[in-house]
Image (cartoon, rainbow, N blue to C red):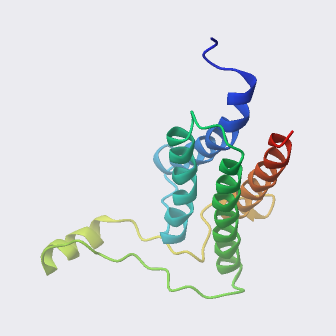
Amino acid sequence: MAFFNKKDGFFLLIPAASAAGLAVALVAQYVFGLHPCELCQWQRVPYVLAILTGIIFRRKKRREIFLIYFLLMAVESALAFYHLAVEKGYVSSGCSDSGGGAANAKEMLDKIMAAPVVSCNQPQFEFLHLSMAGWNGIYALCLAAAAIILFKNAAR
């Protein structure tokens, strides 16, 4: 029995690609100092859920898993394109850094003062006139399309 076979590769493609997308975000944050805004942080959730889905259902190779991947990547893409619309000024957002979880006002103030202030409507990095949110939306859209293709091919 092989540790990794072709069929496993199809079921782990979306979680692996999600891990790569998450890794890019973490490298941008911790290596290049591009601090995430609130919407950036929300965009990480579907990737984490796709990775967890891949880990939890790795042994259950059912084609319906690709529908879960599709839904997660569709949500990821929608979040990213919404973020892009906020950055471009097409829509407004209530994006702010809340001090939730603080026991008292001093702790809340300390947390707010220590956190970098990052606005959702001002991208910190752009490449070919698209911010990281825009590129993330395109990437997630490609992963959603791949999940549908894999779903259709798994029936064969």
Nearer to me, 148 or 80: 148
Q: Quadrant of the N terminus?
A: top right
Q: Is residue 134 above or below residue 29?
A: below
Which residue is at 69% across, 72% downward?
84
Which residue is at 53% across, 53% downward?
49
Which residue is at 77% across, 59% downward?
141
Would residue 46 be found to the left or right of residue 12 on screen?
Answer: left
* Spot occupied by residue 102 in the image (x, y as percentages of width and height): 19, 72
* Spot occupied by residue 139 in the image (x, y as percentages of width and height): 74, 53
* Spot occupied by residue 148 in the image (x, y as percentages of width and height): 80, 53
Q: Quadrant of the C terminus?
A: top right
Identify the image quadrant of residue 112.
bottom left
Would residue 97 be found to the left or right of residue 122 on screen?
Answer: left
Which residue is at 13% across, 74% downward?
103
Q: How many marks?
A: 0
Identify the image quadrant of residue 109.
bottom left
Nearer to me, 22 or 57: 57
Nearer to me, 59 or 44: 59
Extreme residue in the top direction: 1
Nearer to me, 22 or 49: 49
Would residue 19 be found to the left or right of residue 115 on screen?
Answer: right
